[in-house]
Image (cartoon, coloured by chain):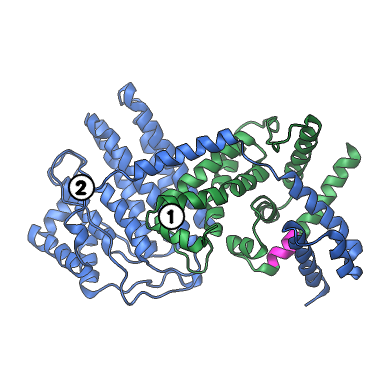
């Protein structure tokens, strides 16, 4: 260890002692007399900084903030209907997914891909999206899927506005917001953790977002929401330098079903790396606001704030995700 | 505080009380971290609130392996901040917020003194590199240990200690120069 490193260690040790009230400056300087002359001015500066930033939020603000959070919690706790699907084990879901393709016909699912809110096949499109999310274990791929879903919700918004289906505007905006929130959370996890592991917690959160997204957008009967799969016994950790490797080994049925459904649902996810994800998000960051801004003049005044909020969500969330991935 | 890991696990499963405890424990520290970064009380309040709402929305996806909850939380705060700075840079320059936060003391002389100190620190910090700023905000604003700062910034502890040293040196130089000129 060179002198500089040694000094940095001593400086930090003294700082830690002073900041935690474990001793005085005099004691520190006595302990390291050979460094005392250099240490003292730095410790004085650090203590001055610490004193200056020792500010507290006002009680009024804390009360207000606590109230806002409680509102958010109450909103999130709104009862969700437990579905038949959410009770099924992964192999059963995978089998049903395959059946969905074969019984309805891959063509039906593919046809549903282009359907819009209010169309008979729209619920099939949403169900196919859910199955794709459910069966995608790799988190980069999952994030890519969510960015594709965001794109779809924007296109649906353009369609409903241009076709005068204004009763769907708020529903689509809500779906878009939830997709972006989930994508934000995924990006954060991908860049924060040194090891990628699919856990029950994360799976449940995805399931919740998916379930939320599956609510009847049209007031018509739709296929019920799907829960995310439990972790498999073959879950393995990978280092942050090796993120593109598979993080979870799906069952054979699940893998087959994922391939079928992804293809049938029109997803073309071919790579799971960060660069690809950044490209999707960077594209969305430009295109989403661009497409949505054109709608502002086409909607009734009372719905303009909904579009404006969606533009804001698109701007803020896509930028946040890019910043997260850039870190 | 009850074992943080335990609380985080409970919060991940949707336990609101557990999240509320984490919120209470980290709220003031996140606020100080934000204030030290932007020096604007109104924005700092809004941003602190947004950090926790986003944390609540995302906590279901948090996984504890190797990364403390605080590192995750400060990462959210950092991202909010970068976004804020990006937006601010597009606006015309405005003077430093006159309503900088002050401690709950009733002595006006003390309030002015501390307010000036904070202003000085916030302004002097702007002359640091981004990495130095982040270390100082996490260490002194957030009250994190070197190890926690290292995990949050995904750097080695040695690198953080070096940044801390150079940041304090640079701050001292700026503050001393300011004092001589002022």
Which chain is green in the picture? B
Task: Decide: is A258 above or below A166.
Answer: below
The x and y percentages for residue A135 are 26, 64
Q: Is A215 left or right of A188, judged from the image as shown?
A: left
Task: Decide: is A78 above or below B154.
Answer: above
Task: Kindly identify which numbered label has been placed on residue B59.
Answer: 1
Q: Quadrant of the C terminus of chain A?
A: bottom right
The x and y percentages for residue B57 are 41, 49
| Residue at 46 percent of width and 45 percent of height | B53
Q: Which residues are magenta?
A: B159-164
Camera-nearest residue between A193 and A257: A193
| Residue at 37 percent of width and 61 percent of height | A202
Assess whether residue A58 is covered by the magenta stretch: no
Quick one: SS at disc 1? helix
Letter of the chain that mark 1 sits on in the rendering = B
Camera-nearest residue between B109 and B158: B109
Mark 1: few, some, or many residues within 10 Å (few <14, many ≥20)? many
Which chain is blue in the picture? A
Measured in 3D between alpha carbons, the distance from the residue under mark 2 to the one under mark 1, in whole angstroms, is 33 Å
The residue that disc 2 covers is A114
2 and 1 marks on the same chain? no
Q: Is residue B58 among what the camera can see?
A: yes
Residue A198: quarter of image: bottom left
């Amino acid at each position: 260890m060179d002198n500089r490193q040694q000094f940095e260690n001593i400086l930090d040790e003294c700082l830690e002692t002073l900041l935690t009230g474990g001793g005085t400056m005099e004691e520190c300087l006595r302990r390291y007399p050979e460094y005392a002359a250099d240490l003292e001015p730095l410790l004085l500066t650090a203590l001055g900084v610490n004193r200056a930033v020792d500010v507290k939020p006002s009680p009024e603000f804390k009360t207000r903030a606590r109230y806002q959070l409680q509102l958010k919690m109450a909103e999130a706790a709104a009862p969700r209907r437990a579905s038949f699907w959410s009770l099924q084990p992964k192999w059963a879901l995978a089998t049903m997914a395959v059946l969905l393709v074969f019984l309805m016909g891959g063509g039906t699912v593919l046809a549903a891909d282009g359907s819009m809110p209010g169309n008979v096949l729209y619920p099939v499109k949403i169900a196919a999206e859910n199955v794709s999310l459910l069966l995608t274990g790799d988190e980069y791929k999952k994030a890519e899927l969510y960015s594709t879903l965001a794109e779809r919700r924007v296109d649906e918004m353009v369609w409903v506005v241009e076709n005068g289906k204004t009763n769907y505007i708020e529903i689509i905006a809500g779906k878009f917001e939830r997709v972006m929130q989930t994508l934000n959370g995924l990006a954060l996890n991908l860049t924060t953790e040194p090891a990628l592991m699919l856990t029950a917690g994360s799976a449940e959160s995805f399931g919740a977002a998916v379930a939320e997204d599956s609510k009847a957008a049209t007031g018509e009967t739709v296929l019920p929401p799907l829960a995310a799969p439990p972790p498999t016994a073959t879950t393995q950790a990978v280092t942050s330098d090796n993120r593109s490797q598979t993080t979870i080994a799906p069952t054979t049925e699940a893998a087959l079903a994922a391939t079928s459904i992804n293809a049938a649902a029109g997803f073309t996810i071919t790579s799971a790396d960060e660069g690809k994800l950044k490209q999707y998000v960077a594209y969305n960051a430009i295109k989403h606001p661009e497409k949505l801004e054109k709608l502002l003049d086409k909607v009734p005044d009372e719905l303009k704030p909904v579009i404006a909020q969606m533009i804001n969500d698109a701007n803020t969330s896509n930028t946040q995700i890019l910043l997260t991935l850039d870190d | 505080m009850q074992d943080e890991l335990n609380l985080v696990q409970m919060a991940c499963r949707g336990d609101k009380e557990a999240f509320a405890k984490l919120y209470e424990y980290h709220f003031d520290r996140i606020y100080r971290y934000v204030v030290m970064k932007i020096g604007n009380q109104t924005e700092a309040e809004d941003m602190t609130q947004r950090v926790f709402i986003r944390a609540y929305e995302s906590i279901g996806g948090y996984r504890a392996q190797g990364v403390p909850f605080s590192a995750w939380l400060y990462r959210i705060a950092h991202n909010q901040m970068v976004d804020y700075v990006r937006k601010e840079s597009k606006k015309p320059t405005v003077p430093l917020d006159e309503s900088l936060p002050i401690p709950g003391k009733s002595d006006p002389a003390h309030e002015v003194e501390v307010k000036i100190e904070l202003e000085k620190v916030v302004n002097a910090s702007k002359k640091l590199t981004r990495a130095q700023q982040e270390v100082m905000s996490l260490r002194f604003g957030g009250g994190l240990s070197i190890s926690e700062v290292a995990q949050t910034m995904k750097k080695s502890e040695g690198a953080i200690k070096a940044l801390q040293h150079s940041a304090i040196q640079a701050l001292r130089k700026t503050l001393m120069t300011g004092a001589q000129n002022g």
